[in-house]
Image (cartoon, rainbow, N blue to C red):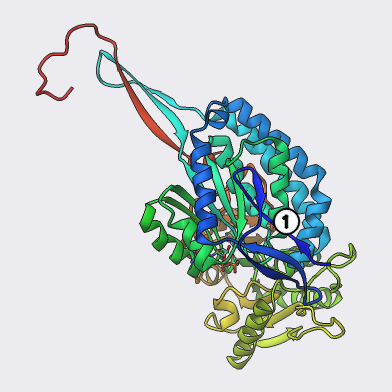
Amino acid sequence: MLQTFRHYIDGGFSDASQTFDSINPATGEVWASMPAASAADVDRAVRAADRALFSPEWANLTASQRGKLLYRLADLVAANAQELAELETADTGKIIRETRSQIGYVAEYYRYYAGVADKIQGAYLPVDKPDMEVFLRREPVGVVAGIVPWNSQLFLSAVKIGPALAAGCTIVIKASEEGPAPLLAFARLIHEAGFPAGVVNILTGFGADCGHALTTHPLVAKIAFTGGPETARHIVRNSAENLAATSLELGGKSPVLVFDDADVDSVSNAIIAGIFAATGQSCVAGSRLLVQRGIRERLLAKLVEKARAIKIGDPQNVDTEMGPLATARQRDHIEAVLAASLAAGAKLLTGGHRPEGMGNGFFFEPTIVECATSDIPSVAQELFGPVLSVMSFDTEEQAIALANGTRYGLASGVFTRDLTRAHRLTRRLRAGIVWVNTYRAVSPIVPFGGYQLSGLGREGGFDAVLDYTRTKSVWIRTSDDPIADPFVMR
Ligand code: NAD
Protein backbone atom coordinates (compact mmCIF):
# COMPACT_ATOMS: atom_id res chain seq x y z
CA MET A 1 0.00 0.00 0.00
CA LEU A 2 1.22 3.49 -0.87
CA GLN A 3 2.22 5.70 2.05
CA THR A 4 0.84 9.24 1.85
CA PHE A 5 2.66 12.34 3.09
CA ARG A 6 1.28 15.83 3.70
CA HIS A 7 2.55 19.36 4.08
CA TYR A 8 2.90 21.07 7.42
CA ILE A 9 1.74 24.68 7.15
CA ASP A 10 0.64 27.09 9.89
CA GLY A 11 0.63 24.39 12.56
CA GLY A 12 -1.55 21.94 10.60
CA PHE A 13 -1.11 19.07 8.17
CA SER A 14 -2.66 19.63 4.76
CA ASP A 15 -2.90 18.02 1.34
CA ALA A 16 -1.71 19.88 -1.73
CA SER A 17 -3.89 20.23 -4.82
CA GLN A 18 -1.38 18.04 -6.70
CA THR A 19 0.63 14.98 -5.75
CA PHE A 20 3.51 13.04 -7.25
CA ASP A 21 4.87 9.52 -6.86
CA SER A 22 8.03 8.77 -4.93
CA ILE A 23 10.12 5.81 -6.09
CA ASN A 24 12.07 3.47 -3.84
CA PRO A 25 15.51 3.50 -5.53
CA ALA A 26 16.32 -0.01 -4.29
CA THR A 27 13.38 -1.53 -6.18
CA GLY A 28 12.49 1.07 -8.80
CA GLU A 29 8.89 0.90 -7.57
CA VAL A 30 6.51 3.64 -6.42
CA TRP A 31 6.15 3.42 -2.65
CA ALA A 32 4.68 6.77 -1.56
CA SER A 33 2.55 9.71 -2.65
CA MET A 34 3.97 13.16 -2.01
CA PRO A 35 2.23 16.55 -2.02
CA ALA A 36 3.50 19.03 -4.64
CA ALA A 37 3.27 22.59 -3.35
CA SER A 38 1.91 25.20 -5.73
CA ALA A 39 2.76 28.91 -5.58
CA ALA A 40 -0.47 29.35 -3.57
CA ASP A 41 0.66 26.73 -1.00
CA VAL A 42 4.03 28.48 -0.72
CA ASP A 43 2.32 31.83 -0.23
CA ARG A 44 0.17 30.38 2.56
CA ALA A 45 3.28 28.99 4.29
CA VAL A 46 5.30 32.21 4.01
CA ARG A 47 2.40 34.32 5.25
CA ALA A 48 1.96 31.95 8.20
CA ALA A 49 5.68 32.31 8.98
CA ASP A 50 5.42 36.08 8.73
CA ARG A 51 2.42 36.20 11.09
CA ALA A 52 4.22 33.88 13.53
CA LEU A 53 7.33 36.07 13.48
CA PHE A 54 5.46 38.91 15.17
CA SER A 55 2.96 36.80 17.16
CA PRO A 56 3.14 37.08 20.97
CA GLU A 57 3.30 33.24 21.19
CA TRP A 58 6.72 33.33 19.46
CA ALA A 59 8.06 36.89 19.57
CA ASN A 60 7.49 37.20 23.34
CA LEU A 61 9.33 33.99 24.23
CA THR A 62 12.64 34.58 25.96
CA ALA A 63 15.74 33.19 24.31
CA SER A 64 15.92 30.50 27.01
CA GLN A 65 12.34 29.48 26.28
CA ARG A 66 13.21 29.13 22.59
CA GLY A 67 16.19 27.02 23.66
CA LYS A 68 13.93 24.76 25.75
CA LEU A 69 11.69 24.12 22.73
CA LEU A 70 14.78 23.19 20.71
CA TYR A 71 15.99 20.83 23.48
CA ARG A 72 12.58 19.16 23.38
CA LEU A 73 12.85 18.83 19.60
CA ALA A 74 16.34 17.30 19.94
CA ASP A 75 14.99 14.66 22.36
CA LEU A 76 12.13 13.85 19.97
CA VAL A 77 14.54 13.47 17.03
CA ALA A 78 16.70 11.07 19.06
CA ALA A 79 13.67 9.07 20.19
CA ASN A 80 12.32 8.79 16.63
CA ALA A 81 15.65 8.28 14.83
CA GLN A 82 14.91 4.69 13.83
CA GLU A 83 11.57 5.49 12.19
CA LEU A 84 12.97 8.56 10.40
CA ALA A 85 16.00 6.56 9.26
CA GLU A 86 13.81 3.82 7.76
CA LEU A 87 11.85 6.46 5.84
CA GLU A 88 15.02 8.10 4.54
CA THR A 89 16.41 4.74 3.48
CA ALA A 90 13.15 3.83 1.71
CA ASP A 91 12.96 7.15 -0.12
CA THR A 92 16.63 7.74 -1.02
CA GLY A 93 18.31 4.32 -0.91
CA LYS A 94 20.91 5.49 1.60
CA ILE A 95 21.91 2.53 3.80
CA ILE A 96 20.18 2.16 7.16
CA ARG A 97 23.53 2.03 8.99
CA GLU A 98 24.24 5.55 7.84
CA THR A 99 20.74 7.07 8.09
CA ARG A 100 20.32 5.76 11.66
CA SER A 101 23.63 7.11 12.90
CA GLN A 102 23.30 10.38 11.01
CA ILE A 103 19.78 11.10 12.30
CA GLY A 104 20.85 10.20 15.83
CA TYR A 105 23.53 12.84 15.39
CA VAL A 106 21.05 15.38 13.93
CA ALA A 107 19.63 15.52 17.48
CA GLU A 108 23.02 16.89 18.59
CA TYR A 109 22.71 19.75 16.11
CA TYR A 110 19.38 20.76 17.63
CA ARG A 111 20.91 20.42 21.11
CA TYR A 112 23.81 22.64 20.11
CA TYR A 113 21.54 25.41 18.77
CA ALA A 114 19.25 25.02 21.80
CA GLY A 115 22.29 25.98 23.88
CA VAL A 116 23.18 28.83 21.52
CA ALA A 117 19.76 30.52 21.80
CA ASP A 118 20.48 32.47 25.00
CA LYS A 119 24.09 33.24 24.09
CA ILE A 120 23.29 35.54 21.19
CA GLN A 121 24.35 38.88 22.54
CA GLY A 122 24.16 42.46 21.42
CA ALA A 123 26.82 44.99 22.33
CA TYR A 124 27.40 48.19 24.23
CA LEU A 125 29.32 50.71 22.11
CA PRO A 126 31.67 53.29 23.70
CA VAL A 127 30.43 56.00 21.36
CA ASP A 128 32.50 59.19 20.89
CA LYS A 129 29.78 61.52 22.23
CA PRO A 130 29.58 62.38 25.93
CA ASP A 131 25.81 62.49 26.33
CA MET A 132 24.86 59.30 24.48
CA GLU A 133 24.41 55.68 25.40
CA VAL A 134 24.52 53.41 22.37
CA PHE A 135 23.86 49.72 22.21
CA LEU A 136 23.24 47.11 19.56
CA ARG A 137 20.28 44.76 19.73
CA ARG A 138 20.49 41.53 17.77
CA GLU A 139 17.11 40.74 16.29
CA PRO A 140 15.87 37.84 14.15
CA VAL A 141 16.42 38.57 10.47
CA GLY A 142 12.85 37.56 9.58
CA VAL A 143 11.21 34.77 7.59
CA VAL A 144 13.78 32.26 6.32
CA ALA A 145 13.37 30.13 3.19
CA GLY A 146 15.35 26.89 3.54
CA ILE A 147 15.94 24.74 0.44
CA VAL A 148 17.62 21.36 0.64
CA PRO A 149 18.78 18.71 -1.87
CA TRP A 150 17.84 15.04 -1.75
CA ASN A 151 20.75 13.70 0.27
CA SER A 152 20.69 14.01 4.09
CA GLN A 153 17.59 16.20 4.20
CA LEU A 154 17.15 16.01 7.98
CA PHE A 155 20.78 16.91 8.54
CA LEU A 156 20.85 19.73 5.98
CA SER A 157 17.62 21.20 7.30
CA ALA A 158 18.81 20.98 10.94
CA VAL A 159 21.68 23.37 10.15
CA LYS A 160 19.06 25.86 8.94
CA ILE A 161 16.14 25.26 11.32
CA GLY A 162 18.40 25.09 14.41
CA PRO A 163 20.09 28.51 14.09
CA ALA A 164 16.94 30.13 12.62
CA LEU A 165 14.84 29.20 15.65
CA ALA A 166 17.63 29.93 18.13
CA ALA A 167 17.74 33.45 16.68
CA GLY A 168 13.95 33.87 16.85
CA CYS A 169 13.27 33.65 13.10
CA THR A 170 10.49 31.63 11.52
CA ILE A 171 11.14 29.32 8.60
CA VAL A 172 9.62 27.64 5.56
CA ILE A 173 11.61 24.58 4.49
CA LYS A 174 11.27 23.11 1.01
CA ALA A 175 12.22 19.44 1.03
CA SER A 176 13.69 18.13 -2.20
CA GLU A 177 11.16 16.54 -4.54
CA GLU A 178 13.46 13.51 -4.43
CA GLY A 179 13.35 11.67 -1.11
CA PRO A 180 11.23 14.14 0.92
CA ALA A 181 9.64 11.49 3.21
CA PRO A 182 11.85 11.89 6.31
CA LEU A 183 11.57 15.69 6.35
CA LEU A 184 7.79 15.66 5.88
CA ALA A 185 7.52 13.06 8.68
CA PHE A 186 9.80 15.18 10.91
CA ALA A 187 7.08 17.89 10.88
CA ARG A 188 5.16 15.80 13.41
CA LEU A 189 8.06 16.28 15.87
CA ILE A 190 7.97 20.07 15.39
CA HIS A 191 4.28 19.87 16.26
CA GLU A 192 4.86 17.63 19.30
CA ALA A 193 7.70 19.81 20.57
CA GLY A 194 5.15 22.63 20.89
CA PHE A 195 6.42 25.32 18.51
CA PRO A 196 3.65 27.87 17.88
CA ALA A 197 1.75 27.60 14.58
CA GLY A 198 3.63 29.00 11.59
CA VAL A 199 7.08 29.06 13.22
CA VAL A 200 8.22 26.07 11.14
CA ASN A 201 6.49 25.12 7.89
CA ILE A 202 7.59 22.13 5.83
CA LEU A 203 6.55 21.48 2.27
CA THR A 204 7.89 19.92 -0.87
CA GLY A 205 7.51 20.40 -4.57
CA PHE A 206 9.49 21.08 -7.71
CA GLY A 207 12.18 23.70 -8.13
CA ALA A 208 10.73 25.63 -11.03
CA ASP A 209 7.40 26.37 -9.32
CA CYS A 210 7.57 25.70 -5.55
CA GLY A 211 11.28 26.63 -5.20
CA HIS A 212 10.90 29.69 -7.40
CA ALA A 213 7.80 30.90 -5.54
CA LEU A 214 9.58 30.50 -2.19
CA THR A 215 12.83 32.22 -3.08
CA THR A 216 11.14 35.18 -4.80
CA HIS A 217 8.49 35.71 -2.12
CA PRO A 218 8.47 39.34 -0.95
CA LEU A 219 8.13 38.37 2.73
CA VAL A 220 11.29 36.21 2.74
CA ALA A 221 14.28 37.92 4.37
CA LYS A 222 16.89 35.16 4.10
CA ILE A 223 17.44 32.17 1.83
CA ALA A 224 19.52 29.27 3.11
CA PHE A 225 20.21 27.02 0.14
CA THR A 226 21.97 23.68 -0.23
CA GLY A 227 22.24 22.09 -3.65
CA GLY A 228 24.14 22.28 -6.92
CA PRO A 229 25.91 25.36 -8.36
CA GLU A 230 23.53 25.62 -11.35
CA THR A 231 20.49 25.85 -9.09
CA ALA A 232 22.40 28.28 -6.88
CA ARG A 233 22.63 30.68 -9.84
CA HIS A 234 18.81 30.58 -10.13
CA ILE A 235 18.54 31.20 -6.39
CA VAL A 236 20.80 34.25 -6.54
CA ARG A 237 18.82 35.63 -9.49
CA ASN A 238 15.59 34.92 -7.59
CA SER A 239 16.89 36.79 -4.57
CA ALA A 240 17.13 39.91 -6.71
CA GLU A 241 13.32 40.03 -6.35
CA ASN A 242 13.19 40.24 -2.56
CA LEU A 243 16.85 41.18 -1.89
CA ALA A 244 17.00 38.37 0.66
CA ALA A 245 20.35 37.60 2.27
CA THR A 246 21.53 34.33 0.75
CA SER A 247 23.80 31.54 1.93
CA LEU A 248 24.86 28.81 -0.51
CA GLU A 249 26.19 25.32 0.33
CA LEU A 250 27.09 23.77 -3.00
CA GLY A 251 28.90 20.88 -4.61
CA GLY A 252 32.50 19.75 -4.51
CA LYS A 253 35.29 17.85 -6.21
CA SER A 254 37.28 17.31 -3.08
CA PRO A 255 40.90 16.11 -3.31
CA VAL A 256 42.45 13.54 -0.98
CA LEU A 257 46.26 13.85 -0.93
CA VAL A 258 48.20 10.76 0.13
CA PHE A 259 51.96 10.98 0.68
CA ASP A 260 54.46 8.11 0.65
CA ASP A 261 54.74 8.03 4.45
CA ALA A 262 51.03 7.28 5.01
CA ASP A 263 49.79 3.97 6.42
CA VAL A 264 48.21 2.08 3.49
CA ASP A 265 45.67 0.11 5.52
CA SER A 266 44.33 3.00 7.50
CA VAL A 267 44.34 5.48 4.63
CA SER A 268 42.54 3.08 2.30
CA ASN A 269 39.63 2.83 4.77
CA ALA A 270 39.42 6.62 4.96
CA ILE A 271 39.43 6.90 1.15
CA ILE A 272 36.74 4.21 0.83
CA ALA A 273 34.62 6.04 3.42
CA GLY A 274 35.20 9.32 1.62
CA ILE A 275 33.98 8.16 -1.79
CA PHE A 276 31.78 5.09 -1.37
CA ALA A 277 29.81 6.00 1.78
CA ALA A 278 26.33 7.17 0.78
CA THR A 279 27.13 5.70 -2.67
CA GLY A 280 29.24 8.79 -3.32
CA GLN A 281 26.21 11.08 -2.99
CA SER A 282 27.85 13.34 -0.50
CA CYS A 283 28.87 16.95 -1.11
CA VAL A 284 32.21 16.28 0.62
CA ALA A 285 32.89 13.05 -1.29
CA GLY A 286 36.64 12.66 -1.67
CA SER A 287 36.26 12.03 -5.38
CA ARG A 288 39.82 12.93 -6.48
CA LEU A 289 42.61 10.79 -5.03
CA LEU A 290 46.05 12.36 -5.48
CA VAL A 291 48.66 9.81 -4.60
CA GLN A 292 52.45 10.13 -4.35
CA ARG A 293 54.19 7.76 -6.74
CA GLY A 294 56.12 5.76 -4.10
CA ILE A 295 52.94 4.47 -2.42
CA ARG A 296 50.74 4.42 -5.51
CA GLU A 297 50.90 0.74 -6.43
CA ARG A 298 50.37 -0.60 -2.91
CA LEU A 299 47.54 1.83 -2.21
CA LEU A 300 45.69 1.21 -5.48
CA ALA A 301 45.93 -2.58 -5.03
CA LYS A 302 44.43 -2.24 -1.54
CA LEU A 303 41.68 0.13 -2.72
CA VAL A 304 40.67 -2.15 -5.59
CA GLU A 305 40.55 -5.13 -3.22
CA LYS A 306 38.40 -3.21 -0.71
CA ALA A 307 36.10 -1.72 -3.37
CA ARG A 308 35.40 -5.19 -4.78
CA ALA A 309 34.54 -6.49 -1.30
CA ILE A 310 31.90 -3.81 -0.60
CA LYS A 311 28.52 -5.42 0.06
CA ILE A 312 25.97 -3.89 -2.33
CA GLY A 313 22.33 -4.62 -1.67
CA ASP A 314 19.08 -3.80 0.10
CA PRO A 315 19.77 -0.54 1.96
CA GLN A 316 17.34 -1.52 4.76
CA ASN A 317 19.59 -4.49 5.61
CA VAL A 318 22.09 -3.59 8.37
CA ASP A 319 24.84 -5.62 6.68
CA THR A 320 24.65 -3.67 3.42
CA GLU A 321 27.54 -1.28 2.84
CA MET A 322 26.45 0.42 -0.38
CA GLY A 323 22.91 1.05 -1.57
CA PRO A 324 21.57 2.32 -4.90
CA LEU A 325 21.81 5.82 -6.29
CA ALA A 326 18.84 7.98 -5.36
CA THR A 327 17.42 8.24 -8.87
CA ALA A 328 17.66 6.56 -12.27
CA ARG A 329 18.57 9.98 -13.72
CA GLN A 330 21.55 10.18 -11.38
CA ARG A 331 22.75 6.68 -12.37
CA ASP A 332 22.38 7.53 -16.06
CA HIS A 333 24.39 10.73 -15.55
CA ILE A 334 27.22 8.82 -13.85
CA GLU A 335 27.29 6.23 -16.64
CA ALA A 336 27.48 8.98 -19.26
CA VAL A 337 30.33 10.86 -17.54
CA LEU A 338 32.22 7.62 -16.95
CA ALA A 339 31.88 6.61 -20.61
CA ALA A 340 33.15 10.06 -21.70
CA SER A 341 36.07 9.74 -19.24
CA LEU A 342 37.10 6.33 -20.56
CA ALA A 343 36.85 7.67 -24.12
CA ALA A 344 39.14 10.54 -23.05
CA GLY A 345 41.80 8.11 -21.81
CA ALA A 346 40.85 7.22 -18.22
CA LYS A 347 41.80 3.65 -17.23
CA LEU A 348 39.19 1.56 -15.41
CA LEU A 349 40.72 -0.18 -12.36
CA THR A 350 37.50 -1.66 -10.98
CA GLY A 351 33.71 -1.32 -11.25
CA GLY A 352 32.09 0.72 -13.97
CA HIS A 353 28.88 -1.31 -14.37
CA ARG A 354 25.46 -1.97 -12.92
CA PRO A 355 25.90 -4.98 -10.59
CA GLU A 356 24.07 -8.13 -11.60
CA GLY A 357 21.02 -9.50 -9.81
CA MET A 358 19.81 -6.20 -8.36
CA GLY A 359 16.43 -6.11 -10.16
CA ASN A 360 15.22 -2.66 -11.16
CA GLY A 361 17.07 -0.77 -8.42
CA PHE A 362 19.40 2.08 -9.39
CA PHE A 363 22.62 0.31 -8.32
CA PHE A 364 26.10 1.02 -9.62
CA GLU A 365 29.40 -0.65 -8.71
CA PRO A 366 32.09 1.10 -6.66
CA THR A 367 34.32 2.39 -9.42
CA ILE A 368 37.97 3.48 -9.55
CA VAL A 369 39.54 5.09 -12.62
CA GLU A 370 43.08 6.28 -13.15
CA CYS A 371 43.39 9.60 -14.98
CA ALA A 372 46.50 11.20 -16.45
CA THR A 373 45.12 14.72 -16.86
CA SER A 374 42.73 17.07 -15.04
CA ASP A 375 40.54 17.68 -18.09
CA ILE A 376 39.15 14.14 -18.03
CA PRO A 377 35.42 14.58 -17.22
CA SER A 378 35.43 12.40 -14.06
CA VAL A 379 38.22 14.60 -12.64
CA ALA A 380 36.69 17.90 -13.68
CA GLN A 381 32.99 17.39 -12.90
CA GLU A 382 31.13 16.59 -9.72
CA LEU A 383 29.53 13.19 -10.36
CA PHE A 384 27.75 12.74 -7.01
CA GLY A 385 28.25 9.00 -7.28
CA PRO A 386 30.63 6.11 -6.41
CA VAL A 387 33.45 6.99 -8.80
CA LEU A 388 36.98 7.69 -7.56
CA SER A 389 39.37 9.37 -10.01
CA VAL A 390 43.05 8.78 -9.24
CA MET A 391 45.98 10.97 -10.25
CA SER A 392 49.66 10.63 -9.30
CA PHE A 393 52.27 13.18 -8.22
CA ASP A 394 55.94 13.27 -7.28
CA THR A 395 56.35 16.46 -5.24
CA GLU A 396 54.33 18.41 -2.69
CA GLU A 397 54.13 21.36 -5.11
CA GLN A 398 52.59 19.15 -7.80
CA ALA A 399 50.09 17.77 -5.27
CA ILE A 400 49.01 21.29 -4.27
CA ALA A 401 48.67 22.38 -7.89
CA LEU A 402 46.49 19.36 -8.69
CA ALA A 403 44.41 19.78 -5.52
CA ASN A 404 43.75 23.48 -6.18
CA GLY A 405 43.23 23.00 -9.91
CA THR A 406 39.44 23.10 -9.63
CA ARG A 407 36.78 25.78 -9.33
CA TYR A 408 35.27 23.90 -6.37
CA GLY A 409 36.65 24.18 -2.83
CA LEU A 410 34.49 22.38 -0.29
CA ALA A 411 36.64 19.78 1.47
CA SER A 412 40.10 18.23 1.25
CA GLY A 413 42.02 15.46 2.95
CA VAL A 414 45.74 15.10 3.65
CA PHE A 415 47.36 11.85 4.72
CA THR A 416 50.93 12.14 5.96
CA ARG A 417 52.88 11.55 9.18
CA ASP A 418 54.98 14.62 8.52
CA LEU A 419 53.63 17.31 10.86
CA THR A 420 55.32 20.27 9.21
CA ARG A 421 54.06 19.22 5.78
CA ALA A 422 50.55 18.79 7.17
CA HIS A 423 50.65 22.35 8.52
CA ARG A 424 51.95 23.74 5.23
CA LEU A 425 49.11 22.06 3.37
CA THR A 426 46.39 23.31 5.72
CA ARG A 427 47.51 26.82 4.74
CA ARG A 428 47.76 26.26 1.02
CA LEU A 429 44.74 24.11 0.15
CA ARG A 430 41.87 26.22 -1.15
CA ALA A 431 38.93 24.53 0.55
CA GLY A 432 36.56 25.29 3.42
CA ILE A 433 37.59 22.11 5.25
CA VAL A 434 40.98 20.39 5.55
CA TRP A 435 40.94 16.99 7.23
CA VAL A 436 44.39 15.71 8.20
CA ASN A 437 44.72 11.92 8.63
CA THR A 438 40.94 11.62 8.75
CA TYR A 439 38.00 12.26 6.42
CA ARG A 440 34.26 13.05 6.55
CA ALA A 441 34.18 14.16 10.20
CA VAL A 442 31.51 16.73 11.13
CA SER A 443 30.30 18.36 14.32
CA PRO A 444 27.68 20.99 15.19
CA ILE A 445 30.47 22.98 16.84
CA VAL A 446 32.53 23.30 13.64
CA PRO A 447 31.61 25.58 10.69
CA PHE A 448 31.04 23.92 7.34
CA GLY A 449 31.13 25.50 3.87
CA GLY A 450 33.09 26.07 0.71
CA TYR A 451 35.29 28.32 -1.38
CA GLN A 452 34.55 29.41 -4.96
CA LEU A 453 31.85 27.30 -6.69
CA SER A 454 31.34 25.32 -3.49
CA GLY A 455 29.46 28.13 -1.84
CA LEU A 456 29.06 31.27 0.14
CA GLY A 457 28.64 31.43 3.91
CA ARG A 458 29.08 28.80 6.59
CA GLU A 459 26.66 26.49 8.36
CA GLY A 460 27.28 24.93 11.79
CA GLY A 461 29.20 26.49 14.64
CA PHE A 462 28.27 29.54 16.67
CA ASP A 463 28.80 32.24 14.04
CA ALA A 464 26.21 30.66 11.73
CA VAL A 465 23.51 31.85 14.09
CA LEU A 466 24.54 35.48 13.52
CA ASP A 467 23.53 35.09 9.84
CA TYR A 468 19.97 34.67 11.11
CA THR A 469 20.11 37.97 12.98
CA ARG A 470 20.54 41.63 12.13
CA THR A 471 21.58 44.44 14.41
CA LYS A 472 19.60 47.44 15.44
CA SER A 473 21.58 50.47 16.73
CA VAL A 474 19.86 52.17 19.63
CA TRP A 475 20.91 55.74 20.61
CA ILE A 476 19.78 57.16 23.93
CA ARG A 477 20.53 60.79 24.76
CA THR A 478 21.28 61.13 28.46
CA SER A 479 21.42 64.92 28.72
CA ASP A 480 18.43 66.91 29.97
CA ASP A 481 19.75 70.07 28.27
CA PRO A 482 17.57 71.36 25.46
CA ILE A 483 18.61 70.22 21.98
CA ALA A 484 20.55 73.10 20.46
CA ASP A 485 21.12 74.07 16.82
CA PRO A 486 18.77 71.88 14.68
CA PHE A 487 20.95 72.39 11.58
CA VAL A 488 24.06 70.75 12.99
CA MET A 489 24.43 66.98 12.89
CA ARG A 490 24.86 65.56 16.36
P1 NAD B 1 19.72 20.66 -6.90
O1 NAD B 1 20.49 21.91 -6.94
O2 NAD B 1 19.21 20.06 -8.18
O3 NAD B 1 18.40 20.84 -5.98
C1 NAD B 1 18.48 21.34 -4.68
C2 NAD B 1 17.14 21.93 -4.27
O4 NAD B 1 16.88 23.09 -5.06
C3 NAD B 1 15.95 20.99 -4.49
O5 NAD B 1 15.07 21.10 -3.39
C4 NAD B 1 15.31 21.56 -5.74
O6 NAD B 1 13.91 21.30 -5.85
C5 NAD B 1 15.56 23.05 -5.56
N1 NAD B 1 15.47 23.83 -6.80
C6 NAD B 1 15.74 23.43 -8.07
N2 NAD B 1 15.54 24.46 -8.94
C7 NAD B 1 15.15 25.53 -8.20
C8 NAD B 1 14.80 26.89 -8.52
N3 NAD B 1 14.81 27.34 -9.77
N4 NAD B 1 14.46 27.72 -7.50
C9 NAD B 1 14.46 27.27 -6.23
N5 NAD B 1 14.76 26.00 -5.87
C10 NAD B 1 15.10 25.14 -6.83
O7 NAD B 1 20.62 19.64 -6.10
P2 NAD B 1 20.42 18.08 -5.95
O8 NAD B 1 20.70 17.47 -7.27
O9 NAD B 1 19.13 17.80 -5.25
O10 NAD B 1 21.60 17.75 -4.90
C11 NAD B 1 22.90 17.52 -5.27
C12 NAD B 1 23.77 18.74 -5.12
O11 NAD B 1 23.71 19.27 -3.80
C13 NAD B 1 25.24 18.41 -5.35
O12 NAD B 1 25.86 19.40 -6.12
C14 NAD B 1 25.80 18.38 -3.94
O13 NAD B 1 27.19 18.56 -3.86
C15 NAD B 1 25.04 19.49 -3.31
N6 NAD B 1 25.12 19.40 -1.84
C16 NAD B 1 25.86 20.32 -1.14
C17 NAD B 1 25.97 20.22 0.25
C18 NAD B 1 26.78 21.20 1.06
O14 NAD B 1 26.53 21.33 2.25
N7 NAD B 1 27.74 21.91 0.49
C19 NAD B 1 25.33 19.18 0.91
C20 NAD B 1 24.59 18.26 0.17
C21 NAD B 1 24.49 18.39 -1.21
At x 86%, y 67%, the residue is 320
Q: Is residue 450 left or right of residue 32?
A: left
Residue 127, compared with residue 216, is above or below; it is above
Judging from the image, what secondary structure is the residue with disc 1 in? helix
Quadrant holding the N terminus: bottom right
Which residue occupies 77% across, 80% down? 365
Percent position of residue 289, x then y: 65, 72
Q: Is residue 400 above or below residue 115?
A: below
Q: Quadrant of ligand 1?
A: bottom right
Of residues 449 and 199, the one drawn nearer to the viewer in this rendering: 199
Q: In the rendered image, which quarter is residue 354 located in?
A: bottom right
Q: Is residue 296 visible?
A: yes
Relative to 106, does residue 454 appear above or below in the rendering?
below
Question: Percent x, y for residue 280?
Answer: 70, 69
Quarter occupied by residue 340: bottom right
Q: Amino acid at mark 1?
A: Pro
Frontmost residue, 108 versus 39: 39
Q: Specify the farthest residue to the top.
A: 480
Q: Please provide percent x and percent y for residue 12.
A: 65, 45
Q: Nearer the viewer, residue 290 or 483?
A: 483
Where does the C terminus fall, quadrant-wise? top left
